[in-house]
Image: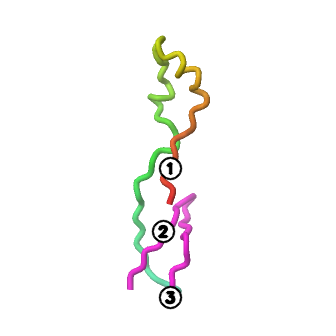
């Protein structure tokens, strides 16, 4: 029987979000899903802006990093 359980790979370990039912030992296949970047691309960080966009530039330090995919 196949079961699919969500989990998170972090620091070399996989943490499952729930315990699989009726399985005490089994082979597994792990598929890594594409994630969004957790930092802004360097081209955005280095962008100096243009004189007309001074309002935006004054908020540069308040930019939050892009979020990773949350399951």
Q: Are marks 2 and 3 in contact (CB under 8 Å)?
A: no
- Residues under labels 2 and 3: Cα distance? 16 Å
Q: Which residue is the extreme one toward the top? A: 51
Number of on-image labels: 3
Q: Alpha-carbon neighbours of circle 1 within 10 Å: few (<14), some, or many (≥20)?
A: few
- Residues under labels 2 and 1: Cα distance? 16 Å
Disc 1 secondary structure class: loop
Tag 3 or tag 1, which sits nearer the N-term?
3
Mark on residue 6? Answer: 2
Residue at point 41%, 58% (across, down): 33
Q: Which residue is the extreme one toward the bottom? A: 22
- Residues under labels 1 and 3: Cα distance? 32 Å
Q: Is residue 32 left or right of residue 45?
A: left
Residue at point 58%, 25% (across, down): 59
Q: Which residue is the extreme one toward the right? A: 62
Magenta range is 1-21
17 w.r.t. 51: above or below: below
Q: Position of residue 71 (x, y in %)?
A: 50, 60
Disc 2 secondary structure class: loop
**Residue marked by disc 1:** 68
**Residue marked by disc 3:** 22
Residue at point 47%, 31% (across, down): 42
Q: Position of residue 2 (x, y in %)?
A: 39, 81
């Amino acid at each position: 029987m196949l079961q699919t359980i969500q989990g998170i790979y972090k620091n070399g370990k996989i943490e499952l979000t729930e315990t699989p039912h009726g399985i005490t030992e089994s082979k597994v296949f792990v598929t890594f899903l594409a994630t969004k970047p957790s930092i802004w691309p360097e081209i955005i960080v280095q962008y100096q802006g243009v004189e007309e966009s001074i309002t935006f530039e004054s908020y540069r330090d308040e930019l939050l990093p892009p979020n990773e995919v949350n399951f």
